[in-house]
Structure formats: structure tokens, C-alpha cells
């Protein structure tokens, strides 16, 4: 229908047009069918393209031309262009960064979330969202082995989740050591940690060089044997170490740190123990793999991205604290008497503890999936993806042309094409292979540097990817390698 | 269809179930119709409820019971409960916080965004998103009056946008003054500023007491007459003032600071000038109201929430810097040689400048609305909402029962019910009125404290709200007031 306001009629043609619900319904149905076809094809067609790569300049030219056209554009014309010019995560060849093909029902909850647009930082604006958040993070906390006092919420991504937790750790330390030299504050973390950990220091205005980066072992997990030595040395240098961070798992290779040992170390030195489970924390849902997270129950804080293996749309990250009081520390200051105003600290005013003031109701994604499919779906996804990674690694190990970087501990597999040829640089060869594969576009994988060398990196994020697909990828790589000049 | 993987068949029932595209299509169509009906009713039915308030405890009980049921739940049963137990922003009675009823087409782009789930922090994962971001923020920068070197991106909300800009300002100052005492850093900002400005200091580890909070005038805009005096005093006390922040507009009353004067003041004292245009920056699209932003063209940085008056779903905030080089400062450190590695600084690797590593492609909302309706739709929305606020304020001024807090400068109107009764506390009376109106649920408005007194606060966020609706609200308030014990 067209709504014509008495007073503003001639001015409001565009608003009225935008709110024609007949058009909206038609567009919604067309879009739903289009997305449905894409999902279907992603599952059934191993040859469908994952990426149609174009250079930044060419891409910009296309969209500049598009944006220069006179409205109105037809929505589906625009949608088709957007889909064709984006990475299609629902393809079986999607093996790229750690973002998932979203669960179909969570495409719908995303639409519902946009319609509702409740900013749940204050209670009334998120009556349902705040309740769901308490329930889901409570369930998660119990899975991780925390006690009843644990408390969590959702924030906009792992970077913010880590920052929220490290800020709480900082406040916790400074309350106990008000005279500590701020510029000497430090934490200990694996050299394989995600860059967001280092960034917390840049944000907080503490030299990032203060961070004690613990070398990794040959599986790219933290070498915990040297923790004591590094701690002593840093302390002698005047560093005020206030926290130790465990990776569960690391970004490049998906390696889990030994969280049990880290928990013991943190306890001995009265450090805050934070677990960055952004990617691998989802293993808590798997009977087979939950053991990798052993030790998390002794952490002060842990984060888990719902928008990774739990297949929710980004961004949606759970931050869980061992106790409600710890969760209130993030935005506290030295002078605060934190627990004076009980009322404001209630669970249903989430804005007090989170960065967001307008806080999206993204908790709906996981709540809905749990209600429709049961929590077990997350265990199935983890089992499937981790299992496939193990199979893939076995295949690579048996294959004479390939070198596996390290046995996978999660769904991330790094490897490279071998060359014994004296005139061929292995890094350049593998970079060339990646360019060829990306240009073909059936598969999308990425790269990483390990011990200074260039490796191909796959995150197996799509539960419909099969070993057959991965064999096809390896054949493609071999073909590309053999065509490499000088081979 | 049901996809059955050869090897994992018995384990994967839930994943297969979640990816049945037939079910997805049906659910999508049902949901689209439901949302369409809600939008339609919001426009046409002035008596439809905006909020069905329930206490946090009752709400939690309901959802705990719900979450305890055995899956599978029917999606639409769940959706109906969620809608009924959330605030309905598409109702004409929605006058609450500064989040909008989302443009219908942006409900669809939210679904598309979830399907694509491209994390655009690296170029290939956001080929389209990065191009759109450059185009839209470029258009915005030109509207604000910046030169060709201006550069912007989108981040997850105003709090993060302000933090991103203030961190750049901090780095800019510390590069010029490497020996400045970090704990003495300070900025100047109106006492009426959003709390996210103060929070930037808590995050950065600088005492929030350092912030020079400039008193407001009787229209709740910054009193710029005393800037020089406050600056001198703070400098004498050893404060290192590095930035001045202008509100465009303030949160409580929607008052614009005098940005021209602030720009001159910043220039004179070599301060970074940041404009928090989270809410009122959208006025740049209105021929009538863009003048309120005069002076922004001299700012170093400005933010604008797309998820406020531009009616995009939250979170989606533009951060625009006067130059590309300034935009690279946020995560730099003193020791960085920023412009050494040209390649990484290219526009299409947005992750380097933003908090997000996985960065949602939320730019699609505004790009799509611009292509379908033209940029003019945003001017229409601003004109409509600001115009309605002026009308509403006139009505309140003429009405003997009401007291207007201040003439509105945007779409925010604060007022209270008058009482001359010696035994009635005006704050308690107005709080009671708010409780009654919220319990009735046709209207949802909020409250604020101004000069120590309790005021009712309306943000006119819905372009379909009419003066008739607001008259109905005033009648309801009068009725509630007359029933107040002792009246």
C-alpha cells in the first residue's frame, strides 16, 4: 500500500515508495528463491565457482559506474551483481578464511533481527534478547565447566571480545596493584596468537613490545616449557605481567595451546587467565573434541565466535567471565566503587558491560538454531569439519607431491607443493599456485607464513565439502605446479 | 533436498535438516509475509501496540521455559513469540531510543548480507563491499565538504566509531609530542556528549577525570564562550589537551554544538577536531538542515550512524577522516613508520584501519537504498522527522499542561507534565506517567535528566508517526496525570 501523509505528500514520494509492502513481499520471495538456489547449488554442484576474482581497480570501476546510474535500480539486478562479485561461502570449494556458510535459518533470523532492530543495551529495548543472551551464555558457561556465578554476553566480534576481556584483566590487576607502572603492563601469549591480542595493547596505550610472545612448538602450540623462564626474565626487566592468554585455537594452523598447563601457571603467578576460543571454542559441543578445551574451566574469561564454526552470520561473539563481578570490570576505573549500585549491575542492562550502546540482538541466531535443531547440531558440525581435516591431512601425508605443515588439531590444514628443483623457489611456486587456483575460482583458499615459508592454508568451514572435492583441489594444484615456468 | 554424505550419513541428520532448501524457501516466504503484515499494520493502525512490557524476571521465565522444550521447535512459533516480546519499531507509537524502523529493503539486504557473510577485512573477501564502502564514504565526505583526500570506512557502531577516531587523534598528538605524559592526556567535549566519548578514555587507560567537560548553554549546546578559559585552566593544571569533540547532535536533547566555532578553536590550539555526528550527521542530506553541520568540513574526523536516521539495521557507522593518512593512525604506534609499506595501506584492505578483522558488509544497506531510491530519500526522512519535532514542540508550547525542555534542533523532543500542586513531586509524577504509558504499550518513549530534573524524551524515528498520534499521546499523558494519587 502507499501511505500518503496529508501534510508531506509531495515531499515523501521516496519514503512511501520504500514502504510499499506489496513490493517488499514480492522482492522478499524473489530473493528467498535466489538464495535457496544458491544454497542448493552449493551443496550439489562441485564445479560451481566460489570466487570470480577481479582486481580492486576493476571492481571499483564496475561499482562506480553502477552507482553513477540514475535510480531506481531494480533490486534483483543489484543483488545478482553483488552475489556474482562476492565470495560464495556456500560453495563446496570455499576453504578460505574462518567465516562459515551461514545456516539457512540464520539468514532468516538475520532478516528478523533487521526488522526488529532492537538495540538491547537497555532492558526494554531487548526484553527477549537479554533473556536469550542470559540463557545461551549460561548454557555455554556450564559446558565450559564454569560454576553458577559465571556470566556472559555477546559482542560484535572476536577482536572486541578479546579487548573486553583483556580490559577486565587490566582493571582487575590495577585494583590490586594501584601503583603499578601503566607503561610496563604486560601479558604472555603465544607468538601464534591472533593479531587482535596485540592490538588490545595498542588500543589501551601500552607498548605492544611489552607483550611476552611465547615461542611455539613444532605443532604451533605454545611451548609451555619456557613459560617460567620468560616470566622471570620479563619480571626482572620490570614488566608487570597481569594475564596469560591461551589460544584455542591459533589462527594460522588451528593449534590448541595446553590450557591446563596455562591455568596452573596463571594460578601460581596470580595472573588473569584468558582463553581466546574465537575459532576453536566451538569444540566444546563435540564429545570427541571438547577435551582440547580442558583447562578453560579455570579461566577468568573465554570468548567464542558464533560466526565461525557455529555458522551464524558475523558478527556475534560470546564473552564469558568466571563470575558476574569480573564481567563488570571492563569499563570500571580505579576510583569506582563497583558494587555500590546493585541495580544497574543487573543482568538485563547489558550495555554496562559491553562496548555497544546500541547492541544488536544477534543472540537470536544461536538461540533459534538450538531450538530448531538442538545444541547437537554444533557438535555435528565440529565433528564433520575436524574429521575432514584429519582425512585431508592423511591424504596430503601420503601424497609425494605435498608437504603437510603440521597435523591438524582443528579444521585448518596448511600445506605446500613440494619441489626439489634447484632453480625453483618453493615460496614463489606456491604463491603462483594460489593465484592460478583463485583465478580458476572453483576453490577459494588462502595462505600463511610458517617459520618464514609460504604455505597454502585451508579452513574447512563448509560441512558439505567432501574428500572428493579436496582430491580435485590437489589435482588442480598439481596441474598448476607442472605448468609453472621451469618445472 | 536432503544431502547425505556417504561417510557421515548417520551423524549428519541435523546438518542435512538445516540445509533443506525446500523448508528454507517455505519459511522465508512465511516470514516475509509476517514481516510485511507488521510493517503494513505499523503504518496504518495508530492503535497497534509498540511494546508489551514484561519484567525481566517474567521475560526470563518465559524464555527459560521455552528453551527447556525439546527440539525441533516450529520456526514461526518462535518468531511470533520473539516479535510479541520485543519492541516494534515500525509502529507509529515508537518514539523511544535513537534506533529506526528499518527500511523494508534493508531487511532484505540484511538477509543477503547474512547469506554472503563476506568478512571484508581483506580484499578478496569483500571485493564488492570494499568498492561500495569507498564509493559511499566518498560521497559522504564530499557532502560534508571534505577534499579529495578524505577517506572513510564503516565500523560496528558509534561507540567504536568514536573510539577509532579518538585513537587516531591520540596517535597524531603523540607523534608530535612523544614526551607527553600519557596519564595527563585530555580532550574537551560538551557535558551533554554521549557516554561513549568518556569511555574512550577508560578504554585507552587514561583517567576519565582528565576530560574537560564544557558546560552547555540553555539549549544544551556547548557553551563555547568559556572554551578559552577552560583550555587555559586545564593547561595550567598540566593537562595535555589533544582534541576537541563537537556533538552533532547531543544524545539527551538532540542539540548541535557550534561546529564552526569549535573548528576555529581547534585550529588556533592545534587540536584534533572530531565531530560525533552519530545521530545528527544525517542532516547533511537535507537542504534545510545541513547548515547545522557547518564546520564539519574543517574536522579531522566525523562519524555518522547509518543505523539511526538513515534507517539501516544496526550496527553500521561511517567513520570519515579528512585524509587517508590520518585514517591510518588509529592502530599505529609511536615507533611505526606508517607510510613505508604503501601496498598494505591501499583502500581495499579495510581491516588495517578498523577494529574488525571479520568486517561485516553492512555498507550494502545504504548502497542499495541509494540505488533504489536515490540519496534524496535520506533528506526526506530528516526533513520529515525534524519537521515533525518542530510541530510537536509548538503544540507542547501552546499546551498549558506541558513544559518543553528546549526548542528541538533535531528529531528529539524532551518535555514534562507540569504540576503546580505543592504536594506533588514533578519528577515522581512524570516517572509515573512514563510507567503508565509503557504499560499501555501503544507508545514507547523514554526519559532523561536535564538540569537534575526528570523529563519525558521522544525521538521521532518513525516517518509515519503523525501529529495526530502525538496528540493522542498527550491526551494519554494528561489522563495518566489526572489519575495520579493526590491530583
Image (tube, coloured by chain):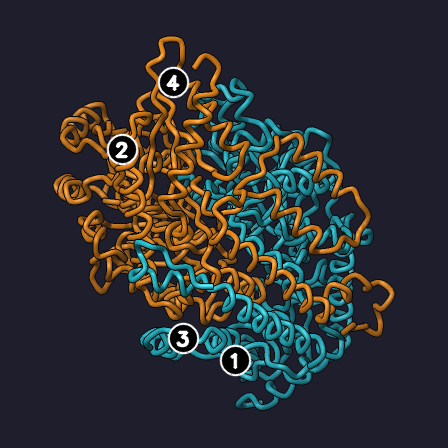
Chain colours: A cyan, B orange
Vertical arrangement, residue B256 with respect to residue B365, above or below:
above
Give the mark nearer the N terminus: 2 vs 4. 2
Work out whether residue B324 or residue B76 is closer to the camera in this orientation and state it: B76
Measured as percent of width and height from the top left, residue B176 is found at 23, 44
Tag 3, which secondary structure?
A: loop
Name the side, left or right, on which A231 lies relative to A18.
right
In this view, the residue farthest toward the top is B423
Instruction: Give the Cα distance between marks 2 and 4.
Output: 27 Å
Q: Are marks 1 and 2 on the same chain?
A: no
Marks 3/4: CA–CA distance: 53 Å
Query: Disc 1: which chain?
Result: A
Residue A27 seen by the camera: yes
Question: Mark 3 against mark 4, which lies toward the viewer?
Answer: 4
Select label 1 or label 2 by which is in front: 2
Residue at the spot 62% in from the left edge and 75% down from the top edge: A38
Q: Is residue B312 left or right of residue A382?
A: left
Q: Chain of mark 2?
A: B
- Which residue is identified by label 3? A73
Could you tell me which secondary element the residue under label 4 belongs to?
helix
Is disc 4 surrounded by few (<14), some (14 to 19) or many (20+) residues within 10 Å?
Answer: some
- Tell me, yes or no, whether the two marked residues, 3 and 4, touch with CB atoms within 8 Å: no
- Chain under numbered label 4: B
Label disc, if present, on residue A193 of the rendered structure? none
Give residue B426's mark: 4
Residue B325, placed above or below residue B275: below
Residue tagged 2: B190
Element carrying mark 1: loop
Which quadrant would residue A288 be assigned to in this image? bottom right
Amino acid at each position: 500500500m502507499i501511505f500518503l501523509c496529508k501534510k508531506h505528500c509531495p515531499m515523501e514520494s521516496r519514503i512511501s515508495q520504500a514502504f510499499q509492502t506489496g513490493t517488499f513481499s514480492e522482492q522478499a520471495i524473489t530473493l528467498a528463491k535466489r538464495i535457496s538456489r544458491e544454497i542448493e547449488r552449493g551443496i550439489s554442484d562441485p564445479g560451481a565457482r566460489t570466487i570470480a576474482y577481479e582486481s580492486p581497480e576493476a571492481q571499483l570501476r564496475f561499482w562506480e559506474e553502477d552507482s553513477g546510474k540514475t535510480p531506481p535500480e531494480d533490486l534483483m539486478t543489484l543483488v545478482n551483481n553483488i552475489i556474482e562479485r562476492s565470495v560464495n561461502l556456500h560453495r563446496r570449494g570455499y576453504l578460505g578464511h574462518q567465516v562459515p556458510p551461514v545456516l539457512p535459518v540464520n539468514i532468516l533470523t538475520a532478516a528478523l533481527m533487521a526488522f526488529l532492530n532492537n538495540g538491547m543495551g537497555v532492558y526494554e529495548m531487548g526484553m527477549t534478547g537479554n533473556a536469550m543472551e542470559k540463557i545461551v551464555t549460561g548454557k555455554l558457561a556450564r559446558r565450559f565447566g564454569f560454576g553458577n556465578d559465571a556470566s556472559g554476553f555477546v559482542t560484535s566480534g572476536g577482536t572486541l571480545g578479546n579487548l573486553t576481556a583483556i580490559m577486565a584483566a587490566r582493571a582487575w590487576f590495577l585494583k590490586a596493584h594501584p601503583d603499578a607502572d601503566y607503561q610496563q603492563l604486560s601479558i604472555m601469549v603465544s607468538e601464534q596468537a591472533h593479531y587482535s591480542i596485540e592490538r588490545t595493547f595498542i588500543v589501551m596505550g601500552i607498548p605492544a613490545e611489552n607483550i611476552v610472545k611465547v615461542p611455539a612448538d613444532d605443532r604451533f602450540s605454545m611451548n609451555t616449557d619456557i613459560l617460567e623462564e620468560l616470566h622471570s626474565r620479563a619480571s626482572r626487566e620490570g614488566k608487570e605481567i597481569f594475564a596469560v592468554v591461551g589460544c584455542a585455537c591459533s589462527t594460522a594452523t588451528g593449534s590448541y595451546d595446553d590450557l591446563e598447563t596455562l591455568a596452573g601457571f596463571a594460578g601460581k603467578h596470580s595472573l588473569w587467565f584468558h582463553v581466546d576460543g574465537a575459532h576453536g571454542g566451538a569444540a566444546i559441543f563435540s564429545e570427541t573434541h571438547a577435551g582440547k578445551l580442558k583447562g578453560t574451566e579455570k579461566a577468568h574469561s573465554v570468548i567464542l565466535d558464533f560466526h565461525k564454526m557455529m555458522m551464524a552470520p558475523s558478527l556475534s561473539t560470546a564473552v564469558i567471565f568466571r563470575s558476574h563481578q569480573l564481567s563488570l570490570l571492563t569499563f570500571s576505573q580505579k576510583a569506582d566503587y563497583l558494587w555500590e549500585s546493585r541495580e544497574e549491575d543487573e543482568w538485563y542492562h547489558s550495555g554496562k558491560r559491553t562496548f555497544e550502546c546500541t547492541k544488536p540482538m544477534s543472540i537470536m541466531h544461536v538461540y533459534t538454531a538450538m531450538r530448531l535443531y538442538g545444541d547437537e547440531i554444533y557438535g555435528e558440525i565440529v565433528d564433520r569439519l575436524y574429521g575432514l581435516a584429519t582425512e585431508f591431512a592423511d591424504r596430503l601425508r601420503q601424497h609425494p607431491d605435498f608437504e603437510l605443515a603440521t597435523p591438524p588439531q582443528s579444521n585448518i590444514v596448511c600445506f605446500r607443493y613440494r619441489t626439489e628443483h634447484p632453480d625453483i623457489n618453493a615460496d614463489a611456486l606456491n604463491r603462483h599456485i594460489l593465484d592460478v587456483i583463485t583465478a580458476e575460482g572453483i576453490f577459494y583458499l588462502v595462505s600463511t607464513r610458517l617459520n618464514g615459508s609460504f604455505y597454502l592454508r585451508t579452513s574447512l568451514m563448509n560441512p558439505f565439502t567432501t574428500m572428493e572435492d579436496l582430491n580435485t583441489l590437489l589435482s588442480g594444484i598439481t596441474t598448476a605446479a607442472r605448468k609453472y615456468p621451469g618445472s
